Amino acid sequence: MNILSVDKLGKSQASKKLFENISFGIEDKQKIALIGTNGTGKSTLLRIIAGKDSADEGNLAFKKGVKINFLEQIPTFKDNETILENVFSSDSPKVQLIKNYELLCEKIAENHDDEELQKDLEKLITQIDHLDAWQYENDIRSILSELGINHLDTKMSTLSGGMLKKVALAQSLIDDSELLILDEPTNHLDLKTIQWLQDYLQKTTQAILLVTHDRYLVDNVCTDVYEIDRQSLNQYSGNYSYYLEKKAEIENSLVQEEQRIKSVLRVELEWLKRGAKARSTKQKARIDRANNMINREKYKPDEEIEISITGRRLGKKILEAEKISKTYNNKKVIKDFSYKFKQGERIGIIGENGSGKTTFLKLLTGSEKPDTGKVDIGINTHFGFFDQYSTALDLEMPMIDYIKQEAIYITLNNGKTISAGQMLERFLFPSNTHYTTIGKLSGGEKRRLFLLHILMKNPNFLVFDEPTNDLDIKTLSILEDFLNEFGGCLIVVSHDRYFMDRVVDYLLVFDGQGNIKGFPGNYSDYIDLQEDLKSEEIQKQNAQKEVYVKNKTTEKNKLSFKERYEMENLEKEIEKLENEKSELDKLFSSGEEDFDKISKWNEKYKTLENQLTTKMERWEYLASIES
């Protein structure tokens, strides 16, 4: 069933046309990734569909009564609000019921003997029963638990960037909707949470429209890829791997067609040079065809960023950390860490949010001092620090002036020297935009400009803290190729699993308790090892259980008279309890509205279940010996 129809949509920003004449539909349960280079209008299109922005032209037609949830790339909050107020901000009756239930539970936890609160809770439980919303409440608790959202009375102003993103994500996931729109949902999330989100999106029956740079997420979740390219929309029915394959085929076909037209045109131009006259209808048609080919819209492959720097020579001593430690808010985030960095090392850093990864980078680069130990930076070591928030950007400054702060000219690895303006063009900023102030750029364009700013320093030791945030997939692919050719050292903190797999070959794993362990391999290698260890642990536990049962059987050979008697009585007791439980099931289905009766039945039902569980476990143990 069609949820949404988009018809001939167009949008411009300032003097730039983002897209025009875009038409597509979204079907029930369809999962779509929207991709395209930064500045092509991906986020704008999502905002238009979500009702946060308007198109210049075209129409949107929604299925009657359709509910849409929207996670913005940069969520906005009121600082004085709590997590609970934000997560449960929907006007949905179910959401409001669960919100009031959570609020009452927190109040009762503080005031156990308040009879009025207990009465309010009883009324609320009745309403939740009436709407059959307990499974919904369980799903919400599961989402909050997985995202690590526990203290719902916490003020939003006190949360970190990662936790703010989690709260916004929770708000978009808990509300019932038919269409879920997500703009860069993985930004600022740790790797464990991203894996959970991927599993959640795979299982949900909602339709999904998302913008993300996480290629593993697109590959494993999405059924379709829509690409904004040259102000138009191209649709591919498949995941990211399929898109790459078909895109390459189409571009190859267009290049071959362009070459064929050029060959035909050469022949036609030679004919025209001989002074051909339109003396017949056939000759006139040939001249018109030649003119049409000359004036055609010529296919040109997409422009690509050219990343090229000479890179300074590293000295014998590059960077040495000796027994460094750091404590924040009485929590030890780094304990007694030592390491000597070697030429050409490519290290990835992984760990949950708050485990000290960014602090570690600041210690290594000298912007913070360790509590104990020391960091010795080589005399020829020059850092390029790409932080996750692009803090060095001056939003009031024109792009060209910002880049010239670092260097007016730069020498490339081929020995050629080019200007700051030429470097901007290599990073896909046309010359007519160079005096645009930074504040007017899209999020992805700002990140691309910040990357250029870092490279203009000509560093030989690159330190990247979440470099993939807001960069488009194409830019990431080019950056990965550059880093694989980069001759200096590299340290990367990233939640982008694909990026980490491509550019690092050694990991430092933060456990959240201040300990840092090394692992030789990339992220997928590490995950494979963890899965193997988990599987081995399960097998070990199962083997121990088998040995335990076997030993018990060997010891006893058979049940004693007392145990056999116990087992026979257990069978009778279990049958009796199951009959009582069955009778209660009939009472629950009787339509009884007396809350006191229902409450008593519910308590008895729970007691019966607990008794059954205990007796069944004992019976199963005795049965295993007997067999």
Image: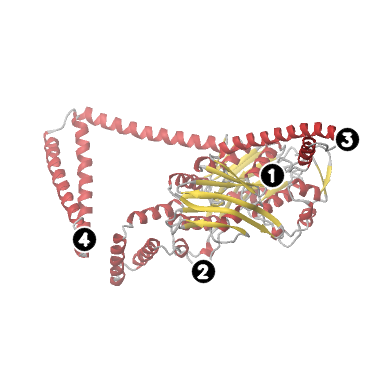
Q: Which residue is mark 3?
A: 275
Position of 253 with respect to 285 (left or right) is: left
Q: Amino acid at mark 1?
A: Leu
Q: Amino acid at mark 4?
A: Ile
Q: Which residue is mark 1?
A: 462
The CA span between labels 2 and 4 is: 40 Å
Q: Amino acid at mark 3?
A: Gly
- In depth, the one of 425 and 279 nearer the eye is 279
The CA span between labels 3 and 2 is: 80 Å
Residue 10 rendering spot, x and y as whole percentages? 63, 55
Residue 71 appears anywhere in the view: no
* Residue at x-position 79% and y-position 52%: 431
Mark 3 vs mark 2: in front: 3
Quarter of the view holding residue 93: bottom left
Circle nearer the N terminus (4, 1) = 1
Disc 2 residue crowd, few under 14, some 14–19, many 20+, Cα 10 Å: few
Q: Quadrant of the C terminus?
A: top left
Residue 1 rendering spot, x and y as whole percentages? 44, 49
Q: Badges 4 and 1: C-beta atoms under 8 Å apart?
A: no
Q: Amino acid at mark 2?
A: Asn
- In depth, the one of 206 and 298 nearer the eye is 298
Q: Residue furthest front?
A: 280
Circle nearer the N terminus (4, 3) = 3
Mark 2 vs mark 4: in front: 4
Q: Secondary structure at mark 3?
A: loop
The CA span between labels 2 and 1 is: 39 Å
Q: Secondary structure at mark 2?
A: loop
Residue 315 appears anywhere in the view: yes
Task: Return the mark for residue 598.
Answer: 4
Q: Which residue is mark 2?
A: 80
Mark 4 vs mark 3: in front: 3
